[in-house]
Image (cartoon, helix red, strand yellow):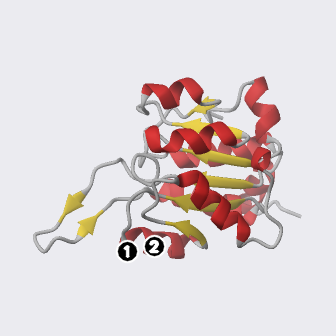
C-alpha cells in the first residue's frame, strides 16, 4: 500500500476524528482560478478526492467545506458529493466552523476535528482543531504547524490521501476494500 499514513503522534489524533474540514483553493482544487470570457469562474476537482470524501461519509466521518471565496461551482461540487456543511466567502474560518457546528445535532469537540488547509487564512482553525493537515506546497507557516502533510498537491489527490490515511488510522480502510472487492460480510 502506498498511502501516506500518520506518524505515531498524528495517529493518536487521527483516531479521534469525526469531522474533516476542507479548504477549497489549494486543497480541493489546485489553487488556480480560471475565468471564462463571460466572467464565469471555473475550477477543476479531482475524482479521487471526491471518492475519498464519499468513503469517509460512508464510514461515518463527516465532511465540511469552509472557503474564503464564494462560487456556485463549489456549492455544486459539495452537493454532488453529499457535503451539507458548507461555508463560503469566509476568511474567518474558525467563526465559520463554530457556526457550522451549531447546526449539527451532536457536534464534535474541537479535538475530534481535522482541518486541511494550505494558506494563512487556515492557520487559526488549524491551531485549534485536533489534527492539522496540509499539502507539500502549502505556505511555510502552515507547513510548520501541521501534524501531517500529503505527498500530493491540492487538486491532485491530496484529499484522497488524507481520507485514506484517516480510514486506516481508524481501522475502517479494510472494510472499504472488502466492500469494493465483494468480500464484505
Q: Position of residue 154 (x, y in %)?
A: 43, 44
Q: Residues within 10 Å of mark 1 (few under 14, many from 20)?
A: few
Q: Which residue is mark 2?
A: 75
The reply, left or right, for residue 169 in relation to residue 136 is right
Q: Quadrant of residue 65?
A: bottom right
Q: Quadrant of the C terminus?
A: bottom right
Asked which secondary structure carries label 1, the reply is helix
User: Residue 56 appears in which quarter of the rendering?
Assistant: bottom right
The x and y percentages for residue 33 are: 26, 55
The front one of 176 and 144 is: 144
Instruction: State the image coordinates of residue 52 (x, y, percent, origin top left).
Output: 60, 55
What residue appears at the point 32 percent right and 61 percent down from the top-left corner?
43
- Which sits in the foreground, 184 or 114? 114
Judged from the image, the secondary structure of the residue bearing numbered disc 2 is: helix
- 97 displayed left or right of 113: left
Label 1 belongs to which residue? 72
Amino acid at each position: 500500500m502506498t498511502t501516506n499514513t500518520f506518524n505515531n503522534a498524528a495517529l493518536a489524533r487521527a483516531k479521534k476524528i469525526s469531522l474533516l474540514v476542507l479548504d477549497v483553493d489549494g486543497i480541493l482544487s489546485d489553487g488556480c482560478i480560471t475565468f471564462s470570457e463571460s466572467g464565469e469562474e471555473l475550477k477543476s476537482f479531482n475524482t479521487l478526492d471526491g471518492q475519498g470524501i464519499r468513503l469517509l461519509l460512508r464510514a461515518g466521518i463527516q465532511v465540511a467545506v469552509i472557503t474564503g471565496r464564494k462560487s456556485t461551482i463549489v456549492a455544486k461540487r459539495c452537493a454532488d458529493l453529499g457535503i451539507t456543511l458548507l461555508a463560503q466567502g469566509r476568511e474567518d474560518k474558525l467563526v465559520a466552523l463554530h457556526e457550522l457546528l451549531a447546526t449539527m445535532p451532536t457536534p464534535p469537540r474541537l479535538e475530534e476535528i481535522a482541518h486541511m488547509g494550505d494558506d494563512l487564512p487556515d492557520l487559526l482553525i488549524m491551531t485549534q482543531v485536533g489534527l492539522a493537515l496540509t499539502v507539500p506546497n502549502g505556505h511555510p507557516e502552515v507547513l510548520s504547524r501541521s501534524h501531517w502533510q500529503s505527498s500530493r498537491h491540492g487538486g491532485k489527490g491530496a484529499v484522497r490521501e488524507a481520507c485514506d490515511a484517516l480510514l486506516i488510522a481508524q481501522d475502517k480502510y479494510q472494510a472499504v476494500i472488502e466492500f469494493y472487492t465483494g468480500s464484505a460480510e
